[in-house]
């Protein structure tokens, strides 16, 4: 089976009725980038930069970050996108040297963009490194854990001042670098029509979107039965995000684990998801599936499950449909 899959590395991710989807990879460091290339990923949909900051004594320098971002970008050339996510620390990931507050609910606390908008020194250094690397390929910037339009606008203001600084120093960067947000807080999914006017793209982070929608900690085994990717509430949010984005002519990716789930894929494709970002090891399996699933069938599957209300029933229905 591995041999069969390997043959797909060079083939397009296209449905039999000619719909092109993008299968891209999630990575945590430049080494993962190579695995993504080998597995035929058409770009990087999520570069989790926090690993650059972890397992060390102090913040990584601008230069160090620049080298890391540039090296991944160069692996993918000019046409394939590399989506770099700004620092998403906090929640389950701590940085000992930052002296972060002990919190009752870290997943609802001082995390990601919240920390970056507070510690703009850290944020600016990272933005400088990302912008500088953007001169070498097709880098896109993505903010994690955005909850309000205010935060998005504040982050963009910081980005703008960093751009001005680079311009003044005559340091090259891509002036048209796309900027998007992760949709992982239900408030943003509900407000997606408004956000869609102010971003270049969305990327749905289902790992967090599911835990916040269901109020079920993604790390807590005791309540894991409530962590339901196939809950109709989650599917409705996803559908509405895609519809809102498409109305504004914006693309929607997904970079949570759900994007690489072969049972979820037919539903997501049918709902119109444009890009699927997953671990490198899932890319070829997803491509094999996409190449035998017509968009027509995916749409009918999506339409049918939106009438159901039981997650297990939904999952079983898709599995059954995909067998024949
Ligand atoms: C997500 O929340 O779906 C996501 C991709 O981000 P992370 O898993 O890094 O929180
Ligand atoms: Mg997340």
Image (cartoon, rainbow, N blue to C red):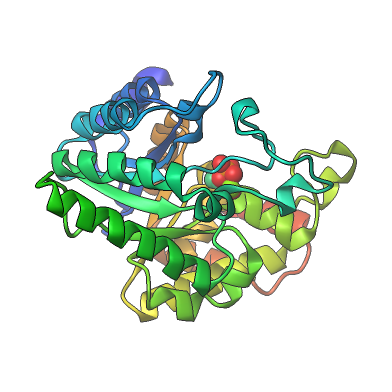
Look at the image and tell me in which quarter the N terminus lies: top left
**Residue drawn at point x = 24 percent, y = 35 percent:** 73
Q: Position of residue 115 (x, y in %)?
A: 57, 49
Residue located 72% across and 62% down the image: 213
Image coordinates of residue 89 in percent, x first then y, are: 58, 40
Compared to residue 281, the image places residue 110 above or below, namely below
* Number of numbered discs overlaid on the protein picture: 0
Task: Mark yes or no: residue 252 visible.
Answer: no
Q: Residue furthest left?
A: 170
Residue 174 falls left or right of residue 90:
left
In percent of width and height, residue 117 lies at 51, 56
| Ligand 1, image quadrant it occupies | top right
Residue 221 figure quarter: top right
Q: Nearer the viewer, residue 198 or 94?
A: 94
The reply to whether residue 157 is visible in this rendering is yes
Residue 237, above or below 181: below
**Quadrant in the picture for residue 202:** bottom left
Residue 209: x percent and y percent? Answer: 64, 57
Could you tell me which residue is drawn at 14 percent across and 53 percent down?
Answer: 167
Left or right of 203 on screen, residue 138: left
Residue plotted at (13% across, 44% down):
171
């Amino acid at each position: 089976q591995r041999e069969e899959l390997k043959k797909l590395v060079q083939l397009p991710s296209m449905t039999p009725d000619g719909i092109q989807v993008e299968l891209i990879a999630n990575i945590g460091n430049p080494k993962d980038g190579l695995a993504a290339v080998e597995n035929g990923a058409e770009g990087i949909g999520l570069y989790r930069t926090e690993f650059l900051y972890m397992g060390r004594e102090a913040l990584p320098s601008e230069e160090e970050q620049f080298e890391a971002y540039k090296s991944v970008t160069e692996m993918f050339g000019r046409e394939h996108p590399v989506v770099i996510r700004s620092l998403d620390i906090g929640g389950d990931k701590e940085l000992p040297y930052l002296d972060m507050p002990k919190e009752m609910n870290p997943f609802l606390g001082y995390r990601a963009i919240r920390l970056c908008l507070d510690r703009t020194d850290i944020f600016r250094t990272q933005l400088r490194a990302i912008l500088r690397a953007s001169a070498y390929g097709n880098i896109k910037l993505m903010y994690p854990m955005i909850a309000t339009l205010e935060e998005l606008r504040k982050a963009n203001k910081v980005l703008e001042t960093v751009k001005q600084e680079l311009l003044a120093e005559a340091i090259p960067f891509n002036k048209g670098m796309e900027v998007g947000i992760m949709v992982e807080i239900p408030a943003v999914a509900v407000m997606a029509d408004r956000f869609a006017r102010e971003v270049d793209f969305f990327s749905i982070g289902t790992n967090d979107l599911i835990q916040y929608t269901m109020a079920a900690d993604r790390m807590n085994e005791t309540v894991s039965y409530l962590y339901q990717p196939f809950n109709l509430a989650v599917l409705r949010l996803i559908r509405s995000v895609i519809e809102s984005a498409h109305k504004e002519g914006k693309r929607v990716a997904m970079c949570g684990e759900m994007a690489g789930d072969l049972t979820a894929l037919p539903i997501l494709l049918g709902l119109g998801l444009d890009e699927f970002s997953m671990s490198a090891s899932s890319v070829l399996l997803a491509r094999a599936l996409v190449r035998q699933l017509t968009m027509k069938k995916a749409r009918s599957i999506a339409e049918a499950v939106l009438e159901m209300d039981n997650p297990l029933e939904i999952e079983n229905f898709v599995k059954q449909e995909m067998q024949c």
